[in-house]
Image: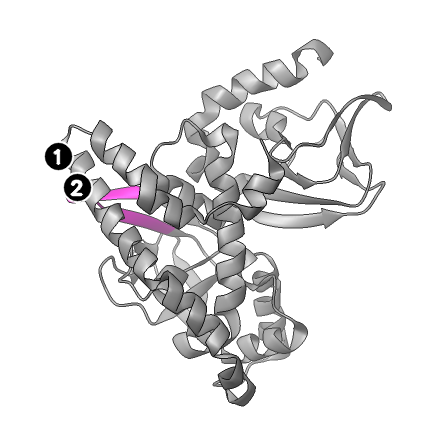
């Protein structure tokens, strides 16, 4: 895999419009598959039409940002710290500076929902996004023959930004799974002027990587890859940092973005991971066993990761491939 190609390659959504949906449509014979392809094509075509205007708006509103006065909703210090903590757990806010973080925190509004209550419904207009503070929420999509479960949202995850980014209707429905859920709601104007540019750049980075990641070649549905970008995060480690210790269980599947990671057994280096897309932490998450090896940063590195809690809604559908890869990667060292 060519790292330069991935970092500088065409945007995932444009690739989907030009190639993937055509391939899906040609290979599909069932009416339900045709409906699904048509729906996704329509959404993505609308996204493509909006691409220039979204980008132009993000950059063209620089002067507006200078004069922008965001709404402010008073909160306790404890509430503000909770919001900041949740924002740190999601990719969408990771590129904001301290001043922008304070503006977004101030504009957030607490919303409380109860079991089985819908937060958003597919097809409705979307004017806000949500960050989950507590509780669990299930996401469903109707392809024409009833709701299909897609994933569960947990504290720290956010949703609703696609309707704001691309000025499109809600793409799915989300309702409360737990007895109660506390969410933080952010309005469209604050999102557009403060968060959008950073969100677009980060989402494009993740989408482009996922589209080119060899591990996902079995996943044919572009929407599955698109939603996977919501479960992808990044983290940096310093030279000498122990990322994952043998004898422990990992809470993340880590993916190499840049840098080298030593793989140790009994304090002896047995091999290293250094290629974009190589991953580790899968041994304990996929097999539910403790990690056999210790992983140490050989230099300052950048990793992407998928949390364990998101495994079932992302990589589990290729679990057989992951199991086979564990034997290939580690078999002779076990």
Distance between the alpha carbons at the discs numbered 1 and 2: 6 Å
The residue identified by callout 1 is 31
**Residue under the point 79% across and 45% down:** 300
Spot occupied by residue 64 in the image (x, y as percentages of width and height) = 49, 85
Question: Can you say whether 22 is above or below 14 in the image?
Answer: above
**Residue under the point 56% across and 64% down:** 93
Q: What's the mark number on residue 35? A: 2
**Residue under the point 43% across and 73% down:** 57
SS for callout 1:
helix
- Residue range in magenta is 138-149
Spot occupied by residue 298 in the image (x, y as percentages of width and height) = 82, 36
Please tell me which residue lies in front, 244 or 305.
Answer: 305
SS for callout 2:
helix
Q: Tell me if I can see residue 160 in this picture.
A: no
> What residue occupies the far left of the structure in this picture?
31
Spot occupied by residue 287 in the image (x, y as percentages of width and height) = 56, 23
Question: Can you say whether 158 is above or below 258 in the image?
Answer: below
Would residue 48 be counted in the magenta stretch? no
Tell me if 213 is positioned left or right of 145 in this view. right
Give the main secondary structure, helix, strand or loop, of the magenta stretch. Answer: strand
Tell me if 326 is positioned left or right of 135 in this view. right
Spot occupied by residue 176 in the image (x, y as percentages of width and height) = 35, 56
Q: Tell me if I can see residue 277 in this picture.
A: yes
Q: What's the mark number on residue 320? A: none
Dot 1: few (<14), some (14–19), or many (≥20) neighbours within 10 Å?
A: few
The reply to whether callout 1 and callout 2 are in contact (CB within 8 Å) is yes
């Amino acid at each position: 895999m060519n790292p330069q190609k991935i970092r500088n390659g065409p945007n995932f959504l444009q690739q989907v419009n030009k190639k993937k949906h055509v391939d899906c449509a040609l290979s599909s014979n069932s009416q339900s598959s045709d409906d699904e392809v048509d729906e996704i094509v329509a959404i993505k075509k609308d996204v493509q039409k909006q691409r220039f205007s979204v980008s132009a708006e993000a950059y063209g509103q620089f002067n507006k940002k200078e004069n922008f006065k965001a709404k402010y909703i008073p909160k306790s210090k404890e509430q503000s710290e909770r919001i900041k903590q949740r924002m740190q757990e999601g990719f969408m806010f990771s590129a904001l500076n301290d001043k922008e973080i304070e503006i977004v925190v101030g504009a957030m509004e607490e919303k409380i929902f109860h079991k089985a209550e819908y937060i958003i419904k597919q097809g409705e207009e979307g004017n806000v996004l949500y960050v989950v503070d507590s509780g669990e929420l299930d996401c469903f999509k109707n392809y024409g023959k009833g709701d299909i479960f897609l994933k569960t949202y947990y504290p720290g995850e956010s949703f609703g930004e696609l309707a704001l980014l691309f000025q499109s209707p809600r793409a799915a429905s989300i309702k409360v799974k737990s007895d109660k859920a506390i969410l933080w709601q952010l309005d469209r104007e604050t999102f557009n002027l403060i968060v959008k540019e950073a969100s677009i750049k980060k989402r494009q980075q993740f989408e482009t990587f996922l589209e080119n990641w060899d591990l996902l070649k079995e996943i044919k549905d572009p929407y599955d890859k698109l939603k996977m970008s919501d479960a992808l995060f990044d983290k940096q480690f310093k030279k000498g940092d122990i990322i994952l210790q043998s004898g422990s269980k990992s809470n993340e599947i880590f993916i190499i973005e840049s840098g080298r990671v030593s793989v140790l057994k009994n304090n002896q280096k047995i091999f290293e991971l250094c290629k974009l897309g190589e991953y580790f932490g899968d041994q304990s998450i996929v097999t539910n066993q403790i990690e056999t090896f210790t992983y140490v940063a050989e230099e300052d590195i950048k990793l992407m990761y998928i949390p364990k809690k998101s495994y079932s809604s992302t990589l589990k559908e290729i679990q057989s491939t992951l199991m086979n890869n564990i034997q290939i990667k580690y078999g002779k060292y076990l």
